[in-house]
Amino acid sequence: MSVLPVSVVIPVASRPELVAEAIASVLAGADLPGELIVVGNDPAGRAADAAAARTALAGAPAAVETRWSFCPVPGPGAARNAGVALSSRPWLAFLDSDDLWQPERLRQQWAYLARRPFLGCCHSREIWWKDGRILQQPLHLQPRRGRFLKASFEHCLISCSSVLIRRELFRSLGGFDEGFPVCEDFELWLRLLCRRPVGLAPGELVTKRSGGSS
């Protein structure tokens, strides 16, 4: 097991049980990030989110720096930006609190990018899980690689929970636009694809969950 120079940022808003499971999925990885930051931004759920996150983060190995923080600005884009501002590693990865990483997530993507130093970002395929069953992903929504800006105007083809991006590239894009109450990640990927190709690491490395919770 290696500890990689990656900062993971997890935003959470009133999802204490789910964020604990998300953190556990990162810490169960074949390789670990050097830093794991959880950012809450729902005042109503702040105490419960903080308690769940701190309990889950307490299980991290000593080599993984952990942090809980609170961002008063609503929206996942603001929470992610706040987490990035607190981070210190040269690579960034994101995980939504209702999603899970597969154990090979970081290892596979790190190896993929190591063989392609011209890329500053990659993503991966996902397992779609809803109400206790796996969904078949439609062909037109499946992730792809390279410069797929035109196709991305029709559908969001990059999942935030699967992205591994160089910090300097993320900062050059200006981060997430906090003025978007939804689709803030979609908007950022369009800006990214205007400038750079995006790699696609092999495997289904993220479980995207929906349904069955608020």
Image (spheres, grey):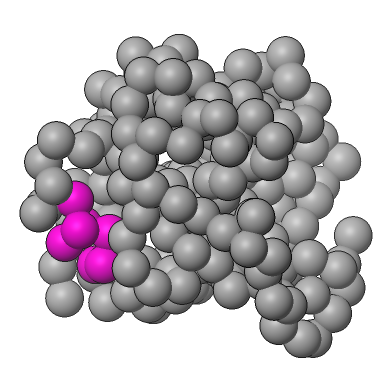
Would you identify the image quadrant in which residue 98 lies?
bottom right
Quarter occupied by the N terminus: bottom left
Q: Is residue 126 above or below residue 69?
A: below
Which residue: 79% across, 25% down?
181
Residue 20 at x, y percent in the picture: 61, 67
Q: Is residue 167 left or right of residue 127?
A: left
In reply to whether residue 153 is colored magenta, the answer given is no
Q: Nearer the viewer, residue 144 or 162?
A: 144
State the extent of the magenta-drawn residues as a range.
107-113
Residue 51 appears in the picture as rendered: no
Q: Is residue 69 left or right of residue 182?
A: left
Which residue: 13% across, 47% down?
116
Which residue: 16% across, 61% down?
111
Q: Is residue 44 above or below residue 28?
A: above
Residue 17 at x, y percent in the picture: 72, 68
Residue 149 at x, y percent in the picture: 51, 30
Q: Is residue 47 left or right of residue 125?
A: right
Q: Is residue 101 left or right of residue 79?
A: left
Q: Nearer the viewer, residue 156 or 149?
A: 149
For the stretch drawn in magenta, what is the main secondary structure? Answer: helix
Label tally: 0
Which residue: 74% across, 20% down?
180
Quarter occupied by the C terminus: bottom right
Q: Nearer the viewer, residue 104 or 159?
A: 159
Residue 172 at x, y percent in the picture: 34, 14
Q: Is residue 94 above or below residue 111?
A: above
In reply to whether residue 112 is colored magenta, the answer given is yes
Residue 31 appears in the picture as rendered: yes
